[in-house]
Image (tube, helix red, strand yellow):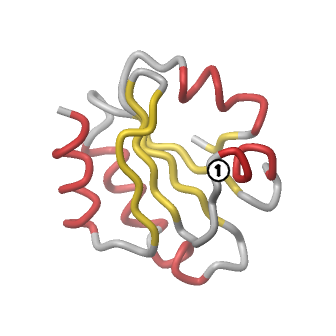
């Protein structure tokens, strides 16, 4: 799911399930490199979490609110709170570990 500043509170902070947000930009080559991995994870974990993307160039308010400095940045939110943050492209296994350690 592609997020916007307007949707962020409802889709992420008010979500009944944990949410992994990928903060990205179109000019970010590592962000592009992991798109396929995120799509795979979205299918694998669809019953347990939401995986969303937020373009930092189009949604500056949310990017600034969460002090996004490096891309990609992955944040898992649970019950409206940030529980873990990772910066830089990750392998599928690293993202699976992040999800399994913080969402179950």
**Compared with residue 67, is residue 83 higher up or lower down, i.e. above or below?**
above
Residue 5 in picture, x, y percent from top left: 76, 37
Q: Quadrant of residue 65?
A: top right
Residue 1 in picture, x, y percent from top left: 57, 41
Give the residue displayed 80% in from the left and 61% down from the top: 57
Give the residue displayed 38% in from the left and 28% down from the top: 78
Q: In this image, 1 relative to 99: left or right?
A: right
Q: Residues within 10 Å of mark 1 (few under 14, many from 20)?
A: many
Q: Quadrant of residue 55?
A: bottom right
**Compared with residue 39, is residue 61 higher up or lower down, i.e. above or below?**
above
Q: In this image, 58 relative to 92: left or right?
A: right
Badge 1 element: strand
Give the residue displayed 48% in from the left and 66% down from the top: 35
Q: Which residue is mark 1?
A: 54
Q: Nearer the viewer, residue 10 or 42?
A: 10
User: In the current view of this chain or complex, which residue is farthest to the bottom?
Assistant: 29
Residue 60 in picture, x, y percent from top left: 80, 52
Give the residue displayed 62% in from the left and 48% down from the top: 66
Q: Nearer the viewer, residue 14 or 32?
A: 14
**Compared with residue 55, is residue 37 higher up or lower down, i.e. above or below?**
below
Q: In this image, 1 relative to 25: left or right?
A: left
């Amino acid at each position: 799911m592609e997020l916007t500043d307007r949707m962020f509170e409802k889709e992420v902070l008010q979500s009944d399930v944990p949410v992994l947000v990928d903060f990205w930009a179109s000019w970010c080559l590592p962000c592009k490199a992991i798109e396929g991995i995120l799509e795979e994870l979205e299918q694998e974990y669809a019953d347990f979490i939401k995986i969303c993307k937020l373009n930092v160039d189009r949604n500056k308010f949310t990017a600034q609110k969460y002090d996004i400095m490096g891309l990609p940045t992955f944040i898992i939110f649970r019950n409206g709170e940030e529980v873990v943050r990772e910066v830089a492209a990750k392998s599928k296994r690293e993202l699976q570990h992040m999800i399994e350690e913080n969402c179950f």
